[in-house]
Image (spheres, rainbow, N blue to C red):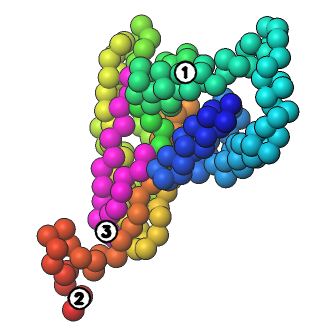
Amino acid sequence: MTGVFLFFLFVLGIKWIDGEQRCDCLGSLSLPLGVMAAVDGMALVSLLLFRRSWERLWRGHGLVFDQIRNLHVVLPALLLGGIAWFGSLDAARSYLSGDPLVVDSFTKFAGEVKEGEFVDVPFRLHNPTSAPVDVLGAKASCSCVAILDLPTTVAPGGDKSIRLRVYGVRASTVQRERAELIFDADAALRMVLNVTVVVRPSSDISDDGSLDEGVQ
């Protein structure tokens, strides 16, 4: 079980590095990453401090105890299997939830962008159903976000890529933007795409290693 919670903390760490703020680890219940990390951390500390009590539970007999012992293998296997098969945990969750449209990842970290410049972030949409899905447009969180490649129709069993163009607004900040896709009334689907970028001052060192104008 110690390995399970270490694995969970590792996954949360990856999400934090990618700029995510919340975790949908409990299905429909979304919690802040810090809260989930605290819960997993307390569980890990409990396992370490009360090791003997947990070992007695671990050595118990019966169906319930057998299932508890299997958790340390089953849960990581399911997580890794979902990533390997669907490409990400977000895609696996959407598919298992029966969503008519699956996205490769709801949240992406786009790296650095200079103030006033932009970066294009691609999202891959997959339609696992037998009916086409129309994406009519999107509602952005800020005028600094443009949604490209819309409107579009994702054919049954097909894939389409759309891009979120994010402009750096304020230097030396971590900028988080989102766009909610708009579907036809029959889709009964809500999908919000999130992008995180680090905005650098426009006078930073340019990509070729030289100093931009204004920096002496």
Q: Earlier in the sequence, mark 1 or mark 3?
A: 1
Q: Relative to residue 19, is residue 2 depicted above or below?
A: above
Q: Relative to residue 59, is residue 168 depicted above or below?
A: below
Answer whether labels 1 and 3 touch (C-beta < 8 Å).
Answer: no
Where residue 52 appears, x then y in whole percent? 82, 34
Q: CA distance from mark 2 to mark 1?
A: 53 Å
Q: Split into 4 quadrants, where in the image is the N terminus? A: top right
Q: Earlier in the sequence, mark 2 or mark 1?
A: 1
Q: Which residue is mark 3?
A: 114
Where residue 96 appears, x then y in whole percent? 55, 17
Assign a secondary structure to mark 3.
strand
Q: Which residues are magenta?
A: 108-126
Circle nearer the viewer, 1 or 3: 1
25 magenta-colored: no
Q: Please, what is the three-letter code of the amino acid marked with disc 3?
A: Lys
Answer whether labels 2 and 1 touch (C-beta < 8 Å).
Answer: no
Q: Please, what is the three-letter code of the amino acid marked with disc 1?
A: Leu
Where residue 84 appears, x then y in whole percent? 41, 24
Q: CA distance from mark 1 to mark 3?
A: 39 Å
Q: Nearer the viewer, residue 191 or 175?
A: 175
- Residue 214: mark in rendering: 2
Q: Is residue 22 left or right of residue 65?
A: left
Can the viewer see residue 185 in this picture?
no
Residue at x 67% of width, y 52% of height: 34
Residue at x 47% of width, y 62% of height: 175
Q: Is residue 150 left or right of residue 213?
A: right
Q: Please, what is the three-letter code of the amino acid marked with disc 2?
A: Gly
